[in-house]
Image (cartoon, rainbow, N blue to C red):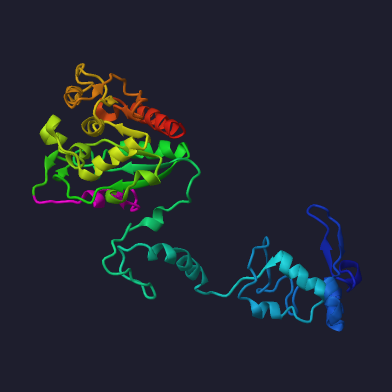
Amino acid sequence: MLSRCCPAPGPETRDTGPGQGSREPDTRSGREAAVRANPSARGRDHPLPRGQSQSSPGRLRRRGPAPGALAGVERDEATAQGRPAGFRAWLRGHVTLRPPPSRAPMAAVWALMAPRLAAASALAPLPGLRPLPANTRTPSPRAALHGSAPRPGPKVALVLSGCGVYDGTELHEASAILVHLSRGGAEVQIFAPDVPQMHVIDHTKGQPAESETRNVLTESARIARGKITDLARLSAANHDAAIFPGGFGAAKNLSTFAIDGKDCKVNKDVERVLKEFHEAGKPIGLCCIAPVLAARVLRGVEVTVGHEQEEGGKWPYAGTAEAIKALGAKHCVKGVTEAHVDQKNKVVTTPAFMCETALHHIHDGIGAMVKKVLELTRK
């Protein structure tokens, strides 16, 4: 009776597939017995190290090959010694062994960041770093964090006057200039004079902060992401063009136009740079209020600050056009998206924020100015 209900003992069986209903002999037990009897057959029939089966908790995990994945797992690879050469090649090409816990990831991060942090002089000295020679001014607190390879296009000097529209450089104008120069393939170096600001404006109130003082070079470094150079070191011999963004810093820190109008004085290095580039026949770009610098230094130059009438508040600084004429320059009426080119003097100007309009129009006008400046570098 027992023989009718239970099959006679024999090889184990397993399903051939879901829903198949048929079973076939399971030969795994036979293979394992064969391997125990003949260890040399393991490399041909069993692609796992000795002592590990398909269900072993410490089995290898299949992953795509990764460079250096076997580093630090000498013990695991040692288990492969004595195996056929084919198994070792398969192991290196198809299996990633799990490395033991270590500090290797943090060491890799430190190896990447250390050279950059070493250049950041604003940080405390790190062990092993060589101090700068005495009386040497650090060229840039964060220069290494903003570095890029030299570009094949014209080399352009960008001259800033601080950071913030009411007492320094207009940030949107500076950013737009940098974007258009980058698209034009230019290599840019940023400069600012190492002088105190005329005053500091609280931009939330539009009022002077009486107890504060700031340095133009230090503030300009914020826009330059730390990679800033003293304007005293700028030479026309090393650059193909110079560009001056606007912002009240041009009228307060680069000159005294905000106080003295047509009788203003211009910072000595700004005046020197304008004359050097002009005499060398190299183009100069200026936007917003900055054209007053060229009007004061380069007699008879043609510039634009937009329209000459306020037109219901659209051109709130239209009176600047009359001051430019009083300085002996010629004012040319242009729209906010346009740039005026003085071909004789190679001076290119655009109104920018002299006009109350949408930001993209300012951006387009600055793009027109930058494009013309770069074109003039090739003539």
Could you tell me which quadrant the N terminus lies in?
Answer: bottom right
Q: In this view, does 324 lie to the left or right of 350?
A: left
Q: Where is residue 61 in the image (x, y as percent from the top left)?
A: 67, 67
Residue drawn at (39%, 75%) of the image:
128
145 and 215: which is toward the camera:
215
Q: 168 above or below 353?
A: below
Q: How many marks?
A: 0
Left or right: 379, with 244 as reference point: right
Query: How far from the left and from the top, in percent, is residue 252?
Result: 17, 39
Q: Which of 198 and 233 is in front in this view?
A: 233
Task: Residue at 35%, 57% (x, y): give it.
Answer: 142
**Which residue is nearer to you in this view: 61 or 182?**
182
Residue range (magenta) = 211-230
Quadrant position of residue 41:
bottom right
Residue 225 rendering spot, x and y as whole percentages? 34, 51
Residue 224 among magenta residues: yes
**Rendered view: 276 above or below 303:** below
Give the image quarter of residue 344: top left
Looking at the image, residue 208 sits to the left or right of residue 2; the answer is: left
Q: What residue is shown at x 31% (from left), y 26% (from top)?
A: 358
